[in-house]
Image (cartoon, helix red, strand yellow):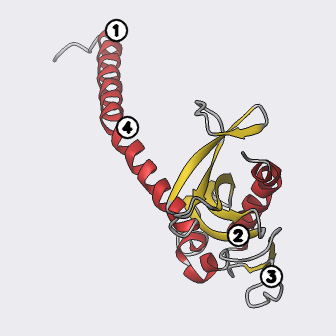
Amino acid sequence: MSAAASPFRLVGTLAGAGALAGLALVFAHQATAPRIARNKAEALKRAIHEVLHDPASYETLYLVDGRLTTEESAGAERVFRGRDADGKVVGFAIEAARPGFQDKVRLIFGYDVRTKLLLGMRVLESKETPGLGDKIEKDEAFVKQFEGPTTPLKGVAAGKRAADNEVDMITGATISSRTVIKIINGALEKWRPLLEAAP
């Protein structure tokens, strides 16, 4: 009959296996992080073009010391200003997030400072319930409502939309629908004065 393994040997084996697993995770993260960052940047670029209806160009504005500037500042909040071929500003793309029913919902929307109208909305990240909450990004009829309404937005029961600032919420996903509305209203309350004063 073989002798029982020493507790120290067991602990050493477990510690060694844990260290190897940790190293494997670190290497995997380092190998995939650049690709993930590139994919996120490409997705953001596509979303900016979508919510601003394919501007000829866009630039990044950074929030520094309470005002917007084109000078890059690491870690600063940012918005994107789109221009047409003649250099005229066509709108701003604004990223914002808020906790939803399951987890944080992150989206981007376009806004025209002159007309005070929304230009479009696209969900960038969401873990809302498949088949229900995820309709905030998959239900094109819901998404289409964010092209042209006045602000602030007001959520109403499905089929009850009557005013220019009203949005039909998704039946069975009212929390997720309301989250999108709250994200946009909250972001505009913060950003509108800054966008109006942008250089």
Q: Is residue 126 visible?
A: no
Q: On the image, numbered disc 3 is attached to which residue?
A: 164
Say which amino acid is labelled 1: Phe
Query: Picture coordinates of residue 53 (x, y %)?
Result: 54, 70
Q: Quadrant of the C terminus?
A: top right
- Which residue is label 2 attached to? 118
SS class, disc 2: strand
Q: Nearer the viewer, residue 140 or 190?
A: 190
**What residue does disc 4 label?**
33
What amino acid is found at the position of numbered circle 2 in the picture?
A: Leu
The Cα atoms of the two marked residues, 1 and 3, are separated by 72 Å
Label 2 close to label 4 by CB (< 8 Å): no
Residue at mark 1 to residue at mark 4: CA–CA distance? 37 Å
Q: Are marks 1 and 4 in contact (CB under 8 Å)?
A: no
Which label's residue is closer to the chain start, 2 or 4?
4
Residue located 79% across and 89% down the image: 160
Say what secondary structure mark 3 lies in.
Answer: loop
